[in-house]
Amino acid sequence: MSESAIYLSGEILKRAKEKGISISNMALQKLLFIANGAYLAKTGEPLIKEPVEVWGYGPVIKSVYHEFKGYGNSEIRQLPMLYSLTPTKSLNEVANQAIDFALKIGEQLNAIQLSNWTHLPDSPWSKAKKENQDIIPNEYMEEYFKQFIKKE
């Protein structure tokens, strides 16, 4: 049930606004990474169609970075055009749970804290970076997030 990262960004931003959570581009990157990891841990399949890349400041989905880079480290105040123009999609229950899980973390941690968490020595980003990979393998994310998510 993989979805476009831009569409999922819109969903995260919409829900964050409803909860009063401020989201920057960096925070959005990390929340997408967490939602994707949670979904992988539950289903064995990625939530995001695009690869999660290994950048110097952590895991990044390139299309999302470019969509929102104009905001710098400020709050993203507008939903992506693609999300706004897309007829209402219905995400499956596990996708909704993965996004809610990521937002629950986003309520507790700011962008810097989220980034630091993704840089922990045992994280999928750290492992892929140490191995000089450009893309974080889904298997790394699935295995890592199993410690946080119960598979049903």
Image: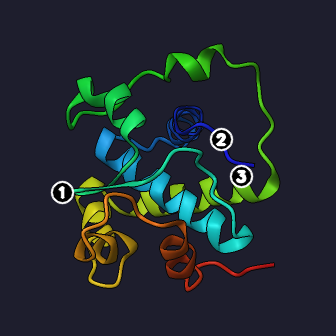
Instruction: Tell me the amino acid under the disc marked 3.
Output: Asn
Which numbered mark, 1 or 3, is in the foreground of this view? 1
Residue 12 position (above or below residue 95): above
**Mark carried by residue 3:** 2
Q: Say which amino acid is labelled 2.
A: Glu
Q: Secondary structure at mark 2?
A: loop
**Does the CB distance between marks 2 and 3 fall below 8 Å?**
no
Q: How is the image coloured?
A: rainbow
The quadrant of the rendering that contains the C terminus is: bottom right
Say which residue appears at 59% left-offset and 62% top-offset: 101
Q: Residue 44: horizontal and vertical position, in percent? A: 69, 70
Q: Earlier in the sequence, mark 1 or mark 3?
A: 1
Marks 2 and 3 sit apart, C-alpha to C-alpha, by 12 Å
| Horizontal relation, residue 45 to residue 92: left or right | left
Residue at the spot 20% in from the left edge and 32% down from the top edge? 72
**Residue 57, relative to residue 75: is it above or below?**
below
Q: Label 2: few (<14), some or many (≥20) within 10 Å?
A: some
Vertical side of 60 occupied by 65: above or below: above
Which residue is label 1 attached to?
A: 56
Give, as a three-letter code, the residue at label 1: Gly
Q: Which residue is mark 3?
A: 96
